[in-house]
Amino acid sequence: MLTGGWVASDATIYSLEDERPDWLSLVSVAIAVDDMVDFEEQYTDVIEQKSDEHGIKCRHPIIKNSDINQWTSDWNRKDVREDIVTSLLEIDSIANIQIVETSLHSEWVTVYKEQDSKKRKRRSEEFIEHDLQPYYNLISIWEYLRKAESRPSTHKNVITDDFSGKTTPVWDQIGKMSNELRVIPKGDETYPLLSLSDLTLELVKQEVDDWHEKDIYEYLRGVTPDDSAWIDSDGIDEERDLKMIAPHKNHNVNTAKQYPSPTYYIDTNGFGKNKLRSTEFYNHILRYAWKTDGCAKLFEESKDREYINSEDFLICMDGNTERYSYLVDLNDESVPNILDVEGAKDILEDQLGAYAG
């Protein structure tokens, strides 16, 4: 399991239609812990207790907002969410919570400024929704790392959910400032700290009426023990910051290099993605990925075959492992473990003691 101090983040978008019909706000929260092992043990204890108390059936130790919605009555849902998330925020190994918010008045923002042939101006609403939203989860981590001197301690091991978008100076700076940087597909379904980042934003959306960094700060201060997290909140909307967070090149960011191994790739050919996600088999894979400090991802052959290696697993849901025999026949070292469902079940049974059928 991951050890030592880590920081994780998530982000969400919110409509400020009461102030202006097309005005959008982005909020990201980064949560840092002093000891990942201690945090995950306490997280698991809280989730087991609260799931039993509220009748929530979690098939994997990670709890999602959709689990709360599915297993609670309409009239109790808000109270249950508040109870669970505030209990998680009381975990004493939480060291820092960094909040950032971006909402822009009508203005033009320059994107792709390092490519003259691609450089263009975006209306602020379009910039927020289409350019900034895909990777806004990075912004709270960037703010957390670049303000290291303003708080008692800063952890430079970074774990974040997978994201898309164009390359930005923020991404480059995070890579340089961090000691270890891991990008996790379906991260908030796999790792407790990413789950808590997601749940914290869901609670904020539920409880905070005025969607600004100061109001969010005041709310989180009120539900976090005084001797616990060092909380900071900032608005990222000044011109000098926009130059950093706007895409500077029209190139897609490459996150695959930051996926941890083992990666458990799942080929859903002939098997619906939504059907897969509803199964215990899928949840066992996520759990095993967490236990082995890896990640799980739906296989995209044209993209993923460049990065798959001998530590990774490729699970064929339709049983046709021969489809990928070329990965074995034509590679010397980057040969993944190719399994059908029964082969994957054997590993999950052996390692987790859970029959994934």
Image: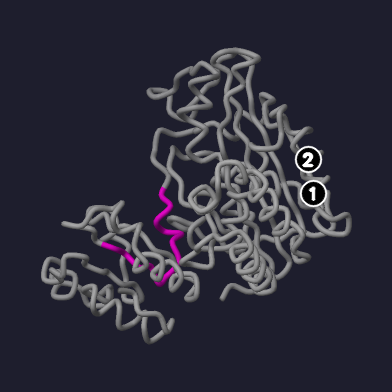
Disc 2 and disc 1 in contact, CB within 8 angstroms? yes
Q: Magenta span has 78? A: no
Q: Which residues are magenta?
A: 254-266
> Which percent across, then down, holds residue 157?
63, 62
Q: Which residue is mark 1?
A: 223
Distance from the alpha carbon under mark 2 to that under mark 1: 7 Å
- Check the image and name the residue furthest to the right: 226
Q: Which residue is mark 2?
A: 219
- Going by the numbered disc 1, the residue's amino acid type is Val
Given residues 99 and 305, the one toward you in this image is 99
Q: Residue at x 40, y 80 (%)?
A: 354
Circle 2 packing at 10 Å, graded few (<14), some (14-19), many (20+), is some
Which of the labelled discs sits on residue 180, or is there none? none
> Which percent across, then down, holds residue 24?
57, 23
> Which percent across, then down, holds residue 110?
52, 22
Left-right relation of 191 to 294: right
Given residues 46 and 10, the one toward you in this image is 46
